[in-house]
Image (tube, helix red, strand yellow):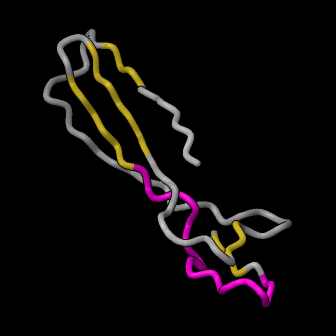
Amino acid sequence: MYFDDGIAETPPCTMVGAIEWQLPRISVQQGRTEIHILASSQRTVGNRAGCLLGPDTGVRPCPNLARTVVLLKQPIGTRTIVFDSFSTVSQ
């Protein structure tokens, strides 16, 4: 969660109360031998000038969890379930 940094010289935080990461998107691709599942999320878009991420001490609020139900085209059977992952670094 974003809060104002409390320093009078900086502009106010325009993202007060916003979560750091947007809710994830779930993607399921079904093939003959594998089922690929991918969850992706990105940082909340916006100007972070004057913003402080979370409290300095204590526990940060837990973000909302996402629950998505996808009906498969056919039973899993002998297919393999693959949880895909990737990493990107943004500056």
Up-down: is 44 above or below 5? above
Q: Nearer the viewer, residue 80 or 21?
A: 21
**Residue at 79% of width from left, 90% of height from top?**
8
The quadrant holding residue 16 is: bottom right
Left or right, residue 15 beside residue 84: right
Name which residue lies at 70% across and 81% down: 4
Please give the range of residues in magenta. Answer: 6-24
Query: Residue 66: image x %, image y %?
Result: 43, 53
Q: Main secondary structure of the magenta part?
A: loop
Residue at 44% over, 57% down: 23
Q: Can you give x and y, in whole percent of width and height, for residue 24 in the image?
A: 42, 50
Residue 76 versus residue 78 in the image, above or below: below
Nearest to the observer: residue 34 or residue 14? 14
Q: In the rendered image, which quarter is residue 52 located in?
A: bottom right
**Where in the figure is residue 82, as x and y percent of width and height?**
38, 21
Residue sitting at 24 percent across and 11 percent down?
33
